[in-house]
Amino acid sequence: MSRFSRYRPGRPPDREADARDVVQEASLSAWRQLSRLRDSRAFGAWLGRTLINSCRMQLRRRSRVRAIPFGLRPLS
């Protein structure tokens, strides 16, 4: 999995820790879904797709976070 930690489609995570988190999530997801893999020869492609999906989920989570600049209050 470490070779995949540098591959981040779309906008790359801002920090190395974010990249490690995405790879860890992809690893866990792959482990849980391993029984769905039909052809063991396609493992690399399947794992890569799992990583891409984890990256996309991370980007979606980030887009939901709204930053409020220091000293300003949100409008009601």
Image (cartoon, helix red, strand yellow):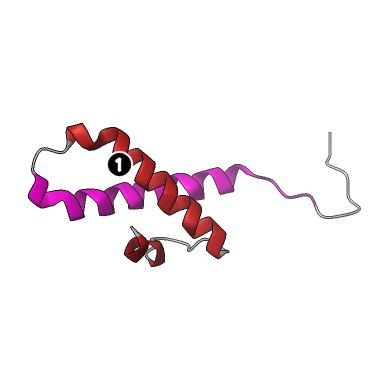
| Disc 1: which residue | 30
Name the spot of residue 48 as percent of width and height, x first.
Answer: 27, 54
> Horizontal placement of 33 versus 63: left or right?
left
**Toward the viewer: 8 or 70?**
8
Structural crowding at the residue carrying mark 1, measured as other residues with C-alpha within 10 Å and reported as few (<14), some (14–19) or many (≥20)? many
Count the labels in the image: 1
Taking depth in this image into account, of 20 and 52 the one nearest to the observer is 20
The magenta stretch is 40-68
- Residue 57 colored magenta? yes
Where is residue 50 drawn, in percent x and y? 30, 47
Q: Is residue 29 magenta?
A: no
The amino acid beneath tag 1 is Ala
Depth check, front residue: 56 or 15: 15
Q: Position of residue 18 (x, y in %)?
A: 54, 56
Secondary structure, mark 1, is: helix
Q: Main secondary structure of the magenta part?
A: helix
Indicate whether 6 appears above or below 66.
below
User: x%, y% of residue 16?
Assistant: 54, 64
In the rendered image, the quadrant that contains the C terminus is: top right
Name the residue at 8% across, 51% down: 41
Residue at x 37% of width, y 64% of height: 7
State the image quarter where residue 25 is shown: top left
Q: Quadrant of the N terminus?
A: bottom left
Query: Where is residue 44, by image quadrant?
Result: bottom left
